[in-house]
Image (tube, rainbow, N blue to C red):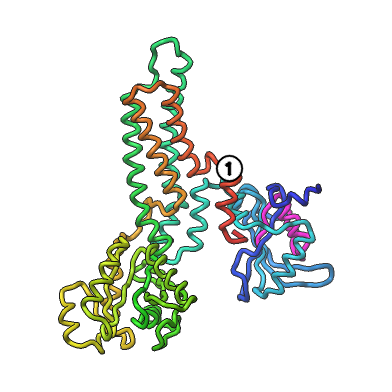
Amino acid sequence: MSPKAHAPNNHDDTIVALATVQGVSALAVIRLSGKDSIKIAQTAFAGKNLLEQQSHTIHFGAITDGERTIDDVLVSVFKEPNSFTHENAVEISCHGSPIIIKEIIKLLLKNGARLAQPGEFTKRAFLNGRFDLAQAEAVADLIHAETDNARQAAHNQMRGGFSQEIKRLREELIHFASLVELELDFGEEDVEFAKRDDLKNLILKIQSYLQVLIQSFDQGNVIKNGVPTVIAGKPNAGKSTLLNVLLNEERAIVSHIPGTTRDSIEDEMILGGITFRFIDTAGLRDTQDEIEAIGVGRTREKMKQASLILYMFDLSQTNSTEIKQEEDELKLLGVPFIKVGNKVDKANRFILRSLENQDFVMISAAQKTNIEELKNLILNQVHINTVKQGDVLVTNLRHYQNLTMTFDSLSRVLKSMDDGVTGDFLAMDIRQSLHYLGEITGEITTDDLLENIFSKFCIGK
């Protein structure tokens, strides 16, 4: 098999990809990285000899294929190790026409580059020691940040505060693990290089810090991924109308015919610096319509998975008994919910009076009445603080799981010491803790783990 067949796994070759958004734009940036990137760019560049230029310089010229000029461009040169990937790198700024981009990339491929895999530039930066794995993941978080809190959380992680603390804790554990394992070499003698009281105090200190990080995930997850908020209720309660009002656009079809919404419709908006993912669902009722029944089943699943439910009651059609029954069913889900009384403009005074002091927000979605009050109630359900520079928050599920497993492993170490377990088993539990911590920063990793992480990045990053 030829070397080309293994190209996607070869980190010595030169990769190329569009680094800016796909589609028509004023400008586009095409990125190359690899030991031959400057040489390959030079083969297509009519202008100064790029091989002779200093790092971090920009040069005007044209990309040409023989006698044919494709576009006038600016070429930025970065020489190893002073680049994002720590390799030779080139960025070509051209006009943002898709045909120009396609022709330039095709020419660079012909001259010796290959197409980059998703996240391969950042993967190379990690493999070349530019930053650790947690910082690499923060690059993707920063690109996809939709709020200032999400941007600041990702930026803090990119700066390495979280990683540095994890590495420091790991080094202290390594020291004690080494001492415990050293004791095993003196199995016939009664020696204790690792003072058990000192080890116990260290573990308690580490667990205390881990607990803070683990607890921060609730806030970090909201900041990064937003709050999935399901709009539920019986058919014709006004769910689609409310979605359209909240988003300020005609996102969902509104009809007086019950059962119009057969499947969930999702869209996002930012309230108070928090992303809410609103999900309009099929109305809850027993139905003989096979398709609508599937939609109702999906509604119930979405409600179980939600972080918040806006449950709508049609005040022009319902009564106190039905409201009580639906509220009891809601409580069984164990998901926070807001009771929304809709069509207040059509409700009779008896139903309104019966619902006083029952934690209802009364609105008219069609008339846009009390929508701001509803938004305030939604925000009050989510309590997060503004992320400041230097704050350490866990926003990544992988990190959260590894921190939790580390905490549990350290708990086993404490129990082993209390039970008088021999040093070899004690060392095993400490090493397991070190493994979980090392996976966070990439000090311990596998090809499968890296593939899983970087395959979720966009091509060109």
Q: Tell me if 277 is positioned left or right of 12 in this view.
A: left
Rendering coords of residue 449 (x, y %)? 56, 47
Question: Which residue is label 1 attached to?
Answer: 446
Q: Quadrant of residue 129?
A: top right
Q: Quadrant of residue 282?
A: bottom left
- The one of 288 and 25 positioned closer to us in this rendering: 288
Q: Please tell me whether mark 1 sits on a helix, a strand or a loop.
A: loop
Residue drawn at point x = 34 percent, y = 66 percent = 308
Rendering coords of residue 442 (x, y %)? 52, 43
Q: Tell me if 459 is positioned left or right of 273 in this view.
A: right
Q: Residues within 10 Å of mark 1 (few under 14, many from 20)?
A: few
Q: Residue furthest top?
A: 188
Is residue 230 positioned above or below 153 on the image? below
Residue drawn at point x = 68 percent, y = 74 percent = 98
Rendering coords of residue 388 (x, y %)? 35, 57
Q: Quadrant of residue 30?
A: bottom right
- The one of 103 and 317 positioned closer to us in this rendering: 317
Q: Is residue 407 magenta?
A: no
Q: Is residue 257 visible?
A: yes
Is residue 355 positioned above or below 204 on the image? below
Rendering coords of residue 223 (x, y %)? 39, 61
Residue drawn at point x = 29 percent, y = 67 percent = 329
- The one of 342 and 227 positioned closer to us in this rendering: 342
Residue drawn at point x = 38 percent, y = 63 percent = 304
Please give the range of residues in magenta: 31-51
Q: Is residue 161 visible?
A: no
Disc 1 marks which amino acid? Thr
Is residue 236 positioned above or below 186 on the image? below
Quadrant (top left/top right/bottom left/bottom right) for the C terminus: bottom right
